[in-house]
Amino acid sequence: MEDFFIIPPKKIESAWNPPDRSLELFVLDYCEEVLSIPLFVIEDAYYTDEGIEIELKNLEDWMIGEDWYINLFRLSNYAKAS
């Protein structure tokens, strides 16, 4: 199962301003430290004009009840791959 999330810029914590360089590291750090997403479920994560886009992979059904997943779902625009 794969899930896609986009966190709009207005919902990104203001203390986490993206740097000019190393956006990939910024996004992964943000996902892990602020959103508490386990790195092993992140397929791809990047920063665009639309915000932080996150693609999760290998999700188990029980993970949907985890706090990090619920918070991510509330913060973001969500789409499930078919």
Image (cartoon, grey):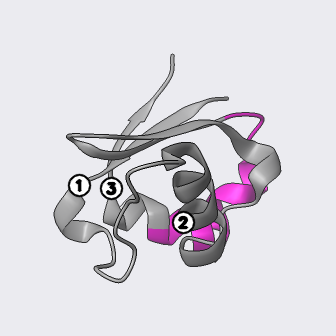
Q: Which amino acid is tagged 3?
A: Ser
Q: Are marks 3 and 2 in contact (CB under 8 Å)?
A: no
Residue 76, disc: 3
Q: Which residues are magenta?
A: 57-71
Q: Is residue 60 magenta?
A: yes
Q: Is residue 76 above or below residue 40?
A: below
Which quadrant holds residue 62?
A: bottom right
Residue 30, disc: 2
Q: Which amino acid is tagged 1?
A: Pro
Image x and y of residue 32, in percent: 66, 66
Foreground of the two, 43 or 14: 14
Q: Are marks 1 and 2 in contact (CB under 8 Å)?
A: no
Q: Which amino acid is tagged 2?
A: Tyr
- Horizontal side of 60 relative to 48 (left or right) equals right
First in sequence: mark 1 vs mark 2 = 1
First in sequence: mark 3 vs mark 2 = 2
- Horizontal side of 18 relative to 40 (left or right) equals left
Residue 8, disc: 1
Foreground of the two, 45 or 26: 26
Q: Are marks 1 and 3 in contact (CB under 8 Å)?
A: yes
- Horizontal side of 74 relative to 34 (left or right) equals left
* Residue at x-position 50% and y-position 22%: 81
- Distance CA(mark 1)–CA(mark 3): 7 Å
Disc 2 packing (10 Å; few <14; some 14–19; many ≥20):
some
